[in-house]
Image: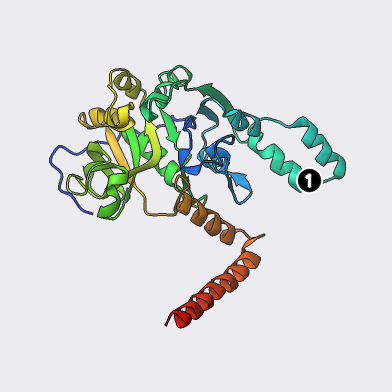
Amino acid sequence: MIVPHTTPLSEPAPERARTVRKAVVPAAGLGTRFLPATKATPKEMLPVVDKPAIQYVVEEAAAAGLDDVLMITGRHKRAIEDHFDHAFELEQALAAKGDTVRLDAVRDPARLADIHHIRQGDPLGLGHAVLCARHHVGDQPFAVLLGDDLIDPRETLLSRMLDVRDRYEGSVVALMEVPPEQIHLYGCAAVEPSRPGEDGVVRVTGLVEKPSREDAPSRYAVIGRYVLDPAVFGVLDRTPPGRGGEIQLTDALRELAADGTVHGVVFDGLRYDTGDRADYLRTVVRLACDRADLGPEFVAWLKQFVAGLEATGARRDRFAA
């Protein structure tokens, strides 16, 4: 999508070493769309093949060089803390059996990064969750990764966003072009080119939280990856509750965008949405098919299963006729 620019083009900041080392992972949601499974189990701990969804997110952060991860949790989320801690009895039992494969799998979560936890307390929205990270982050830029959005490990979205932050400073959001009938499900960005010759990077001039199809300024949806300047904390401090009575991160970023300090990285790669039950099931199937240890056998079974469904459907149609 090509848009004209109406304000002076941004100039990149001088080359420098990467400045972002910290990641924040909000994980305090109630997971009501997955009840009753999430009554006692955090939605972030639901397995995607054989790893909880939140582990994929932390692996993504670590792969991009973010070695300090703060998880914003809530009540009944202790399982997340336990998963990223050592399990001495289990590790000793696996070591005694000589089961090195499972032993490494159990140890890996605790070795991904320096992981911290803090409770949000009141569920007052994503903006409030980010604000809870203020003392841990301090005056440093930081990344925010939402656990509902899984980015395929072969993609480099987060690294691209960190590079854009290092060039332009300010804040960076991930954008994906979606069909018009889906834009009401997302925050939506108004954009213009950032500078000539830079494909896939735009400047964000405005943001609207979950607009109607008619009111959307574009088809660019904000997906769950952000690299934020610490200036966002001061804005969140004075941001009143917005849509749904919650403090919306989108509202704070809209104010920053008015100063020309928010850029967007357009992403057209593989993204998996685990926040919806049907999309969660599709995510499990797609990632299982990609696994070298599971894929060949699973794909062969899946083909037989689908063929059986089609045959059953044909028989039903014949009987109905």
Q: Where is residue 126 in the image (x, y as percent from the top left)?
A: 39, 30
Residue at 33%, 30% (x, y): give it.
249
Q: Position of residue 54 (x, y in %)?
A: 54, 39
Q: How many marks?
A: 1
Q: How crowded is mark 1: few (under 14 residues within 10 Å), some or many (20 or more)?
A: few
Residue at 32%, 43% (x, y): give it.
186
The answer to which quarter of the image holds residue 114 is top right
Image vertical order of residue 191 relative to residue 86, above or below: below
Image vertical order of residue 319 relative to residue 33, above or below: below
Q: Mark 1 points at which residue?
A: 100
- Between 10 and 185, the residue placed more toward the observer is 185
The answer to which quarter of the image holds residue 53 is top right
- Between 47 and 254, the residue placed more toward the observer is 47
Q: Can residue 194 be seen in this view?
A: no
Three-letter amino acid code at disc 1? Thr
Left-right relation of 128 to 217: right
Q: Is residue 226 visible?
A: yes
For this orientation, the residue located farthest to the left is: 6
Residue at 46%, 53% (x, y): give it.
279
Which quadrant of the figure contains the C terminus? bottom left
